Image: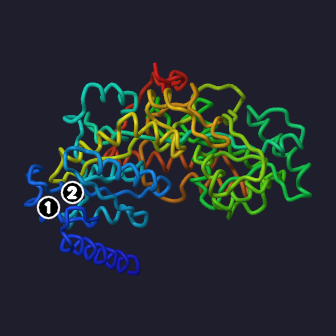
Amino acid sequence: MKRSHSMLLLAIILLMVLSACSSGNTNKQTNESDSNSERSGKNQQASSGEKTKLVYWTFDRHDADFIKETVDRYNASNEDNIHVEVKSMAENYAQSVDIAFASGQSPDILRPNQDTMIPFMKKEYLEPLDSYLTDEMKQKFEATFQDQVNQFDGKIYSLPNFGYTLRLVYNVELFEKAGIEKPPASLDELVDAAKKITDVGKADGQYGFALNFKSPKSALDRSAREILQLSGYDGFGFDHKTAKFDFTPYKEVIEAFKQMKDDGSMLPGVESLDIDPLRAQFAEGKIGMYLSYSAEAGVYSSQFPAKIEWAATLAPTITGEIKGTSGFANSGQWLAISSQSKYKEEAWKFLSFMYSDETLQAYHEKGLGLSAVPTIASNAKAPELTGVDGFLISEYDALWPVPPAVTVEGLNYGDVFLKYILGGGDLDEAVSDLNQRYNSALDKATASGEIKVTPDASFDPIKLQGSMLAK
């Protein structure tokens, strides 16, 4: 009842805001948005001097200043009499989009991501971009097109800008203090390095390893995922060759994490540790290693200025041998056009500006995110951020095929594996149960037509190496 009441209240508030925007000052330069119904009769003729007003909704906060400056520059310089208004809606973004579409007052430009792209597609919120794409743009973005990411039934609905590499982040000073000459290349070396750091640092409150286990699945998706993918396995428990879930490869990674916990090599209290408190502890020099995304370079530049020397490198693999690639994360989507927009041509002109080499290159070079576009990543200067060198795209980074998203009954794999790390038990039995429950959910989803999966017996992750580098 409380959730229903909250959603109703949110709907009422948003509709009031949208109504206020549509009935307010209609001055051509105003930052208030008109409703679609009002705009339809006012923006037909650019020659009349009226601005075609486009509304752009985003949930991103880390790039807010850059986006504002870029949109301001577009508004001041474009010759198409277009004015774009940006609205940042970090809280309840997806729900706000739902309400806006239901009331026929959607923005013209949306920011989908890996969590909202498929729901937005199923609700028919997005306009296909194929008819707008030039041959030059198709060639520029071709390597980034992925089924169930930005391409559905052969149609493109969004283009990427940036993404995140995954790396082992480590304290250089603690490595030197513990006599460790180089970062660990295998799980055995990871466990050993964590123990050595703890042995020499525990008296000063320094420990070898940590993860944000307050959110177990999030912790494993930024750590076990990376180790597994470099080892040649999908990082989300899916076997692309058989099109079935199989969490068996997780066993050695989870055993290594449990060993570090049993050794006392993990920072005390990791089971309730969130990612920002973890980062704060690392910046203070209390953690030797953890695994995470390339966003960390910006974090230690501004949010938690690092008081220690640190670096990033490829994650260890199960055996020390690289048999795959590290997945390039959260990179498939950036901007999209609303299917309800009355100004799709104008919206595309704005998207063309945002997806220009100049804009994408500046985004990369300012350290807001590593470019997912091979030609941009190859030609742009490295961001001027301490530690970013270790995160830059290499031959061992790639876009992996996307595993199906299923709704599983019972605990998810993050919760199951954390339970074992903390308290032990029968790991074989836990893996068998996960396989059964996840495949049962997959069977139900495929039977209903919600999900389509096809086995790919020829899939070989080692063939992905080098795929993100410009040819």
Residue ID for mark 1: 39
- Give the crowd class for mark 2: few <14, some 14-19, many >=20 residues within 10 Å: many
Residue ID for mark 2: 53
Give the image location of residue 163, x and y in percent: 49, 41
- Give the crowd class for mark 1: few <14, some 14-19, many >=20 residues within 10 Å: some
Q: Nearer the viewer, residue 257 or 273?
A: 273
Evaluate if marks 2 and 1 touch, with contact meaning CB atoms under 8 Å apart: yes
* Three-letter residue code for mark 1: Arg
Q: Residue at x 24, y 75 (%)?
A: 20
Give the image location of residue 435, x and y in percent: 53, 45
Q: Earlier in the sequence, mark 2 or mark 1?
A: 1
Q: Nearer the viewer, residue 426 or 148?
A: 148
Q: How is the image coloured?
A: rainbow
Left or right of 71? Residue 295 is right
Element at label 1: helix
- On residue 98, the disc is none
Q: CA distance from mark 2 to mark 1?
A: 8 Å
Q: Nearer the viewer, residue 122 or 458?
A: 122
Give the image location of residue 301, x and y in percent: 64, 51
* Three-letter residue code for mark 2: Lys
